[in-house]
Amino acid sequence: MTPAVRREGVLPDRQVALVDLLDRLLAGGVVIAGDIVLSIADIDLVRISLRALVCSVATLEDGDEDGR
């Protein structure tokens, strides 16, 4: 099977501007979460938990009106 035939089933390539992508992410909101644990010999030395909500102020205000 040639690469051209395999790509037919894949979504077509689209170029999206970074500004458009950022606008969509801020309009809907994004939650970023992660945990990092540094340990030696099964002894946890450092534990870091990261939680972040990224959205626009307008999105937060719309959520408040809905009673969320």
Image (cartoon, grey):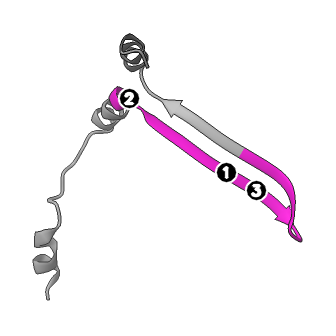
Q: CA distance from mark 3 to mark 1?
A: 7 Å
Q: Residue 26 has which mark?
A: 2
* Residue bounds of the magenta highlight: 26-48
Q: CA distance from mark 1 to mark 2?
A: 23 Å
What is the tally of numbered marks visible in this picture? Answer: 3
Q: As shown in the figure, which amino acid type bears the numbered disc 2? A: Leu
Instruction: Choose top left, top right, bottom left or bottom right for residue 28.
Output: top left
Q: Quadrant of the C terminus?
A: top left
Q: Are marks 2 and 3 in contact (CB under 8 Å)?
A: no
Which residue is the site of mark 3? Answer: 37
Instruction: Choose top left, top right, bottom left or bottom right for residue 16.
Output: top left
In the rendered image, the residue lying farthest to the front is: 67
Residue 45 location in percent, x, y? 88, 55
Residue 40 location in percent, x, y? 87, 67
Q: Are marks 3 and 1 in contact (CB under 8 Å)?
A: yes
Front position in the image: 14 or 68: 68
Q: Residue 35 has which mark?
A: 1
Q: As shown in the figure, which amino acid type bears the numbered disc 1? A: Asp
Q: As shown in the figure, which amino acid type bears the numbered disc 3? A: Val
By secondary structure, the bulk of the magenta-drawn segment is best described as: strand
Q: Secondary structure at mark 2?
A: helix
How many C-alpha atoms fall within 10 Å of the one at disc 1: few (<14), some, or many (≥20)?
few
